[in-house]
Amino acid sequence: MKVIELKNVNKTFHRSGGQKLLRHYLEDILGKTDPEQFFALKDVSFSIRDGESVAVIGANGAGKSTLLSLVTQLVPPSSGTLDVRGRTAALLDLGSGFHPDLTGRENILLNASLLGFSRKQAHDLYDSIVEFSELDDFIKEPLRTYSNGMMLRLAFSVAVNLDPEILIIDEVLAVGDQKFQAKCTEKIFEIRNQGKTILCVSHVSPTLQLLCERALWLDHGQLVMDGPIGEVAAAYEGRLTRQG
């Protein structure tokens, strides 16, 4: 079963154009000028089946993070169709969905409810989240008192322990100290081995190639290659070598 499917998806953004004179703003408002657009994604089509682990690779500015923002439905496509089927947990900007004035405990329960869990289900998962985060001594303190590393630990623990059907990862494996990083990596592999779907953005690395069996290569917003991760990674690194 296809759990993620994109058909001819485009995502455009307006360029700010830097500083403008007042008359230029008035011209924009009155529709006398067309704002300059650029394509973050251009005519992208692919599908991911239930249980697949897929990497997205490409240079900075290739459109990788934009793609994940679309899949997590943080932003809509400008055109084309996008379907996502299943409960999604996203490790993007860790902690972006937290409220600084709420305690760690309150943020856990709030995030669980936003993902559709009942109050009982959220409380059943609470202990495992706190245990994984290793923040039991601070869990009843406001999040604004947390260090950045503590907040990242909590956000990661919430995302991976709320039983996602689709796990979205964007360059966030470097969470905490080396011991905790190893723990996070082990948890992600555990999720994959449970047959869950994983979509991951990261630089080509041995860990990425162990985690994913397939890769999508984006370049300037376009999908240039889709295939086994070893073949796609070799082609991508070969281009980097030639350009270097």
Image (tube, helix red, strand yellow):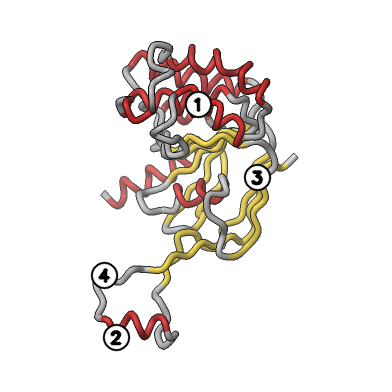
Would you name the residue on which mark 1 appears?
106
Q: Earlier in the sequence, mark 3 or mark 1?
A: 3
Which is more toward the observer, 92 or 199? 92
Q: Quadrant of the N terminus?
A: top right
Q: Earlier in the sequence, mark 4 or mark 1?
A: 4
Give me the C-alpha separation between circle 4 and circle 2: 14 Å
- Between disc 4 and disc 2, the foreground one is 2
Circles 4, 2 touching at the beta carbon (< 8 Å) = no
Quadrant of the rendered image containing residue 34: bottom left
Q: Residue at x 58, y 60 (%)?
A: 9
Mark 3 Cα-neighbour bin, 10 Å: few <14, some 14–19, many ≥20: some
Would you name the residue on which mark 4 appears?
18
Give me the C-alpha separation between circle 1 and circle 2: 49 Å
Which residue is situated farthest in the right direction here? 1
Give me the C-alpha separation between circle 3 and circle 1: 31 Å
Q: What element does badge 4 sit on?
A: loop
Which disc is residue 4 wearing? 3
Q: Where residue 154 sits: x, y (%)? A: 44, 24
Q: Residue at x 42, y 34 (%)?
A: 95
Which is more toward the observer, 28 or 200? 28
Give me the C-alpha separation between circle 3 and circle 4: 37 Å
Q: Earlier in the sequence, mark 3 or mark 4?
A: 3
Q: What element does badge 2 sit on?
A: helix
Which disc is residue 23 wearing? 2
Q: Where residue 218 sits: x, y (%)? A: 47, 51
- Amino acid type, label 4: Gly
- Amino acid type, label 2: Arg
